[in-house]
Image: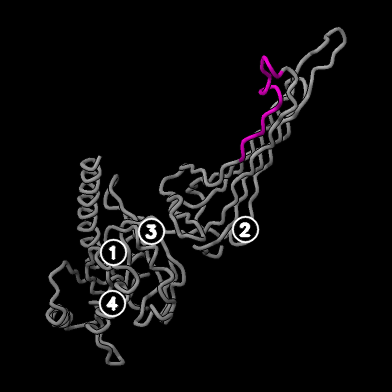
Amino acid sequence: MKFIDEAKIQVHAGKGGNGVASFRREKYVPRGGPDGGDGGRGGSVWAIADRNINTLIDYRFARIHRAENGEKGQGADCYGKGGRDIELRMPVGTIIRDAGSGELVADLTAHGERVLIARGGQGGLGNLHFKSSINRAPRQHTNGEAGESREFALELRVLADVGLLGLPNAGKSTFIRSVSSARPKVADYPFTTLNPSLGVVRIGQDASFVIADIPGLIEGASDGAGLGHQFLRHLGRTHLLFHLIDIAPPEDGADVVRDVRAIAGELRKYDEALYRKPRWLIFNKVDLAPDADARIAKILRRLRWKGPWFAVSALSGTGCQEVCKTAYRFITEHRAKTIRAKKAMN
């Protein structure tokens, strides 16, 4: 199935049914009085997070969604039937924004989360409600209200704890295959990964975290080079970024330090908050560089890097478990801090 992470939809809630003016007419019941019922409520539109859906492709082709209108009231105190609600099932991690203003309407982060996105109109009142001591035969009634009509922009951001960054062919797909059961495509040409991939990294029987691989980023992505910035949104929910660096001797004389700074610059252009996320350097393909230690030391010195870094071989698995165990400890501590901060705010 094609991976779709953006879509625009229109939703139209149902109109409320009209109230009715009616009078009781039965044999042997003179002056029966008003008995007009109310109109039914219009159907509403709900968004529901469903973990069994992983793409917005359904909403790329089905753009308009309408709930049922309410039925009008009837005589003999009969109220109109309410319109049926509709439920739009979306992947967990979907962000719903107003297409015009960009205002955040909902952020579906948990399976089963249900959010009202368009409210149905109230039904009109029948003349039964207008009866009084001075108005015993009211002919007034009200029409039903119109339901809400809105246009939304849907954006899917995958839920992952760790995100992989790096140039094309840095070994991100090989790394995620090495540490999880995910099986993204691996090949010896750039931009092998065209869509985000998720993998579950298991540290122990009850210890795990989710890692996300996105297509490679290159300098000029903010101007549309390569695949541009279109998949960086999927790193927005992560706690930690792994910046994979190919430490093998470059055939074209590429400057690794310049490339690392270029990727960091593209992150900053896209989102300052994403740039400030904790980022670890993962030097990959050390098995192909006899002088890997000297190369890494030189790169760290030129970058003036003070943060964590690791040397691994994603192909053979060397060093990968150490990275994952350290990352799991970091994520666990980060989650605990976040929970404490939220409790302090409340």
Q: Earlier in the sequence, mark 1 or mark 4?
A: 4
Q: Which residues are magenta?
A: 121-135
Q: Earlier in the sequence, mark 1 or mark 2?
A: 2
Asked whether residue 339 is drawn in magenta, I would say no
Place of residue 311 in the rendered image (x, y in percent of width and height, measured from the top left):
20, 71
The front one of 244 and 141 is: 141
Place of residue 151 in the rendered image (x, y in percent of width and height, measured from the top left):
56, 56
Question: Which label belongs to residue 273?
Answer: 1
The residue lying at 70 percent from left, 22 percent from top is 128
Q: Tell me the amino acid under the disc marked 3.
A: Gly
The front one of 258 and 154 is: 154
The residue lying at 52 percent from left, 63 percent from top is 4
Callout 4: few (<14), some (14-19), or many (20+) C-alpha neighbours within 10 Å?
A: some
Question: Which label belongs to residue 265?
Answer: 4
- Indicate the secondary structure of the residue bearing disc 4: helix
Q: Tell me the amino acid under the disc marked 1.
A: Ala
Q: Nearer the viewer, mark 2 or mark 3?
A: 2
Residue assigned mark 3: 199
The front one of 76 and 88 is: 76
Callout 2: few (<14), some (14-19), or many (20+) C-alpha neighbours within 10 Å?
A: some
Residue assigned mark 2: 63
